[in-house]
Amino acid sequence: MAAINNIMCAVDFSEISPRVASYAQILAKSLKASVQVVYVAPGATEYLGFYIQPRYMDKVENIMQEILSEAEKTLDAFIQKNFSGIDVTGKVLSGYAPEEIIKFLKDNPIDLIIIGTHGRTGIGRVLFGSVAEKVVKSSKAPVLTVRP
């Protein structure tokens, strides 16, 4: 059986995130594993679906830096509130969540991903898609999904 030494806990700060963290905390303690808590902030292309004139790019980049800075503060507070007694670090990424999670997986020795689902069905699922589903389909590591 494969050893689980490094767990990725992917969160989006929604109401399901503390539950996802709880699973990561329990598994990490029992397996003596470390946890990497990952949050993916939307990149500029997720915010802006139109052409931006070059003279405004500095302003857009400043806004994106502020978003990432606030996301790091939120992630630090989330980790403080939801994890204790284990080796845990946080990482804020930027871009399209499924792609960034898989890229992080390829660049880091992750043995298990824990990610929440929102339980959307019908038109909600069509409109918003499923990050968890895309990660499950693309991941080389096992994925534990946590439903609301």
Image (tube, helix red, strand yellow):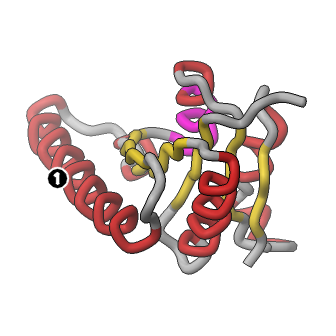
Give the crowd class for mark 1: few <14, some 14-19, many >=20 residues within 10 Å: few
Q: In the figure, 5 relative to 88: above or below?
A: above
The quadrant where residue 142 appears: top right
Q: Is residue 134 left or right of residue 78?
A: right
Residue 103 is situated, as x and y percent measured from the top left of the image, at 57, 26
Q: Which residue is at the front of the view, 59 or 65?
A: 65
For image coordinates 40% across by 50% down, the residue present is 41
Q: Residue furthest right?
A: 1
For residue 100: magenta? yes
Q: Is residue 141 left or right of residue 72?
A: right
For image coordinates 78% across by 53% down, the residue present is 144
Q: Which residue is at the front of the view, 70 or 86?
A: 86
For image coordinates 39% across by 62% down, the residue present is 79
Quarter containing the N terminus? top right
Q: In the figure, 3 relative to 121: above or below?
A: above
Residue at which label 1 appears: 66
Magenta stretch bounds:
96-103
The quadrant where residue 118 appears: bottom right
Which secondary structure lies at badge 1? helix
Q: Which residue is at the front of the view, 137 or 78?
A: 78
Q: Is residue 111 left or right of residue 142?
A: left
For image coordinates 39% across by 45% down, the residue present is 89
Q: Which residue is at the front of the view, 130 or 84?
A: 84
Q: Of the residues shown, which amino acid type is indicated by label 1?
A: Glu
Q: Is residue 139 left or right of residue 49?
A: right
| Prevailing SS of the magenta stretch | helix
The quadrant where residue 51 appears: top left
For residue 97: magenta? yes
Residue 111 is situated, as x and y percent measured from the top left of the image, at 70, 33
Quarter containing the C terminus? bottom right
Residue 22 is situated, as x and y percent measured from the top left of the image, at 61, 69
